[in-house]
Image (cartoon, rainbow, N blue to C red):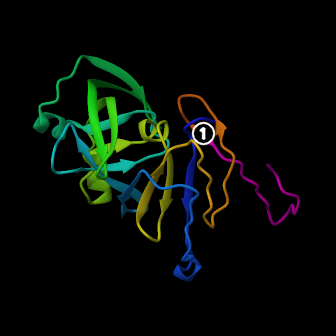
Amino acid sequence: MKGRMLCISLWLDSALLTSGPAHAQEAIERIPMEFADGLIIIPVHVNGREDPLDFMFDTGAGVTAIDAGVSEEMALITSGSARIGTASRSLKVQESLSNTLRLGNRFILDSISLFVMDLRHLSEHLKTDIDGIIGFDLLDKVVVETNMDRREMVLFTEEGHSYRGLGVPLELTELESNHFGIPVTIRTKANKRPEK
């Protein structure tokens, strides 16, 4: 599945970290992460803006969104409206074409459409500024590994990438609209036989 590998390493104890190299190749970028109610927030520079914006990393997001207030402040040019699906409903939003996103010091996502939507409800719920949401546009370009203990997102090219962390890689099942699923086994107390 080209460009759709997500490795999440959850460390239960810092002592589990090894001192040797964890990856077969050098990272193309390392991005600091913050957390808000268990969600990952990363700094993203939009269209050459010096100060980064706070984007929520959402692996299920099929588009990259920017808050309407931030869009207005940045005077983003919109080319018309579009309809996008969210987890709960379909929304009519404005679309700004051909934007450039920089993550870290050098990783660039070019020609990105930003969908302008009101994200105030997220900021209020999480009690932190959420300027945008990024997901598929990032996952489609690189291999993304997140290390919760180090609060770091590490980006790799897919060519020659070999995950060597302590986590267990899972095979992804591609679903519709740029979503993916993972295999889950459930064992109930009443039925010891696993159900898939």
User: Observer-nearest residue: 73 or 45?
Assistant: 45
Q: Residue furthest bottom?
A: 15
> In the drawing, does residue 96 fall left or right of residue 19?
left
Q: Please tell me in which quadrant of the rendered image residue 16 appears.
A: bottom right
Q: Is residue 65 left or right of residue 68?
A: right
* 48 and 76: which is toward the camera: 48
Height in image: 67 above or below 91?
below
Give residue 34's position: percent from left, percent from top. 34, 63
Q: Is residue 177 magenta?
A: no
Q: Quadrant of the N terminus?
A: top right
Residue range corresponding to the magenta coloring: 180-196
Q: Tell me the element at label 1.
A: strand
Name the residue located 57 percent from the left edge and 42 percent from the top edge.
159
Front-most of 188 and 55? 55
Write down the quadrant of residue 90 in the picture.
Answer: top left
Residue denoted by label 1? 180
The furthest residue to the top? 80
Query: Residue placed at 56% from the left, 36% from the top?
Result: 179
Q: Is residue 36 left or right of residue 174?
A: left
Which amino acid is tagged 1?
A: Phe
Find residue 180 and report its horizontal and vertical position in percent. 60, 39
Q: Residue at x 60, y 46 (%)?
A: 160
